[in-house]
Amino acid sequence: MRKTFALEDLDCAACAAKMEDAVSKIDGVKFVSVSFITQKMIIEADDENFDAIMKKAVKACKKIEPDCRIIM
């Protein structure tokens, strides 16, 4: 499954790169792209575990950029 999520309050491109790296390390993630310019995250992951993977992704992103929200 591949989905695109809007990001709110992502402050810099460096944080976007760190978020992308952290999410890419989550088991089941096949592809992830975090764009500071478009304020979007594209994530492709296993269908059966997508919700659990997204919870982990949100947690990982909050550690890097606490003010950033992933709009689901």
Image (cartoon, rainbow, N blue to C red):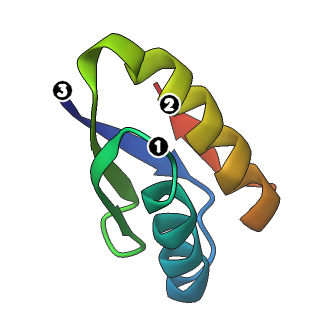
Q: Residue furthest bottom?
A: 14
Q: Residue furthest front?
A: 27
Marks 3, 1: nearer the viewer: 1
51 over 6 or under it: above or below: above
Q: Residue at x 61, y 28 (%)?
A: 55
The reply to whether dot 2 and dot 1 touch (C-beta < 8 Å) is yes
Categorize mark 3 by other alpha carbons within 10 Å: few (<14), some (14-19), many (20+). few
Report the side of 39 relative to 8 (left or right). left
Checking the image for residue 1, the label placed there is: 3
Q: Amino acid at mark 1?
A: Asp
Categorize mark 2 by other alpha carbons within 10 Å: few (<14), some (14-19), many (20+). many
- Foreground: 66 or 56? 56
Image x and y of residue 32, in percent: 31, 57
Image x and y of residue 65, in percent: 73, 63
**In terms of image quadrants, where is residue 46?**
top left
60 over 5 or under it: above or below: below
The reply to whether dot 3 and dot 1 touch (C-beta < 8 Å) is no
Report the side of 69 relative to 50 (left or right). right
Q: Amino acid at mark 3?
A: Met
Checking the image for residue 53, the label placed there is: 2
Give the structural element (helix, strand or loop) at label 2.
helix
18 over 9 or under it: above or below: below
Distance CA(mark 2)–CA(mark 1): 8 Å
